[in-house]
Amino acid sequence: MTMESRLPQRLAVQLKDHSLPVEQIPDHCPVPLSDARKAELKAEITSHLKARDAVLIAHYYVDGEIQDLAEATGGFVSDSLEMARFGKRHAASTLIVAGVRFMGETAKILSPKKRVFMPTLKAECSLDLGCPPDEFEAFCDAHPDRTVVVYANTSARVKARSDWVVTSSVALPIVEHLHARGAKILWAPDRHLGRYIELKTGADMMLWRGACVVHDEFKTKGLKDLMKLYPEAGVLVHPESPEEVIALADAVGSTSGILKAATELPHTTFIVATDKGMFHKLKQKNPGKRFVEAPTAGDGATCKSCAHCPWMAMNHLQVLADTLRSEALMLANEIQVDPAVGKRAMVPLNRMLDFNFSKA
């Protein structure tokens, strides 16, 4: 039985579907570059980073060339939580965040005195867009008895309205902690991750009905068919995927959790249900293993993303170089967070960062 089916009708009506319709999802495919052009752009970007006292911080889902450049220039590649932590502790006065807007906002909230830029502010997130702050605040106000826990894939204003901010790597122990203390949870925005946590913890969770355009696309039938082709393969699934897909997994985890499982599990072949940008780091860390994309095609498929976030795809060498060389583009792509909102959002973010996982 789903949480929605357990709710009174008046509440179920409020829990409308906040998944993005296909017409709101951009069609973005960068122009392929020659090796020579890539080398030129990398050299230019490296020079600009040094001149601007900037460090490049990249998410696992962006272009592999960007990931490699971040590490080669003293920057960092990781999940959204560790990206923000790295930016906070790094000495650079300027952070260049290659990812999606909420990641840049989180970096700015945690490092308010630093300037934070992105290759392009057009890089959004379907979960963030599917959780409009005004609607979310009204929903929270209607249920004041619930502890508000929001996923990091949300705007600064949504974070500011929450009691806790979590990432997929830490959501489970934090909700377990709250549930053990009798809290009833209002969760947003990803319904699949929320449902996964609800089942794991037994917590009373009211779920906002958002979904990631990438992970929502994975299909059970297609995955089962692929498992027949690779019967020896381990199945790695991100918890933003549908419940029936998660049920087929050998390991369920965040981006960092999937990397860990691929290294530690004995399989030499893996079927992976997450953004295909992840395959760059999976192959780097596991050169002797094979990684196969979980299917998003087949019965009932819409292929809104075809397993790669179209907004993450906006982060590539050319757009990064264009932004870094232009003062006008730098200003256009600077992250701005209202100081009052940032101060409020810092409270639930710090609760996550200060949480004692060893005692959870």
Image (cartoon, grey):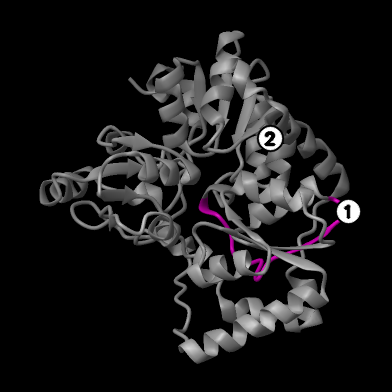
Would you name the residue on which mark 1 appears?
113
- The spot of residue 334 in percent (x, y) is 77, 66
Secondary element at tag 1: loop
Figure check: 299 above or below 47: above
Asked if one can make out residue 193 in the rendered structure from this viewpoint, the answer is yes
How busy is the neighbourhood of tag 2: few (under 14 within 10 Å), some, or many (20 plus)? Answer: some
Foreground residue, 207 or 329? Answer: 329
Foreground residue, 162 or 274? Answer: 274
Any magenta on residue 113? yes
How far apart are the alpha carbons under marks 1 and 2? 28 Å
- The spot of residue 191 in percent (x, y) is 45, 35
Figure check: 113 above or below 31: above
Quadrant for residue 333, please give it: bottom right
Return the mark for residue 137.
2
**Amino acid type shown at disc 2:** Glu
- The spot of residue 288 in percent (x, y) is 30, 57
Q: Is residue 17 left or right of residue 337?
A: left
Q: Residue furthest front?
A: 288
Residue at point 36%, 45% (across, down): 262
Residue at point 25%, 42% (across, down): 234
Secondary element at tag 2: helix
Reading the chain from its start, which is encountered first: label 1 or label 2?
1
Q: Is residue 92 left or right of residue 250?
A: right
Quadrant for residue 182, please give it: top right
Quadrant for the N terminus in the image: top left
**Amino acid type shown at disc 1:** Lys
Dominant secondary structure of the residues highlighted in magenta in the image: loop
- The spot of residue 316 in percent (x, y) is 55, 74
Q: Nearer the viewer, mark 1 or mark 2?
A: 1
Region rendered in magenta = 112-126
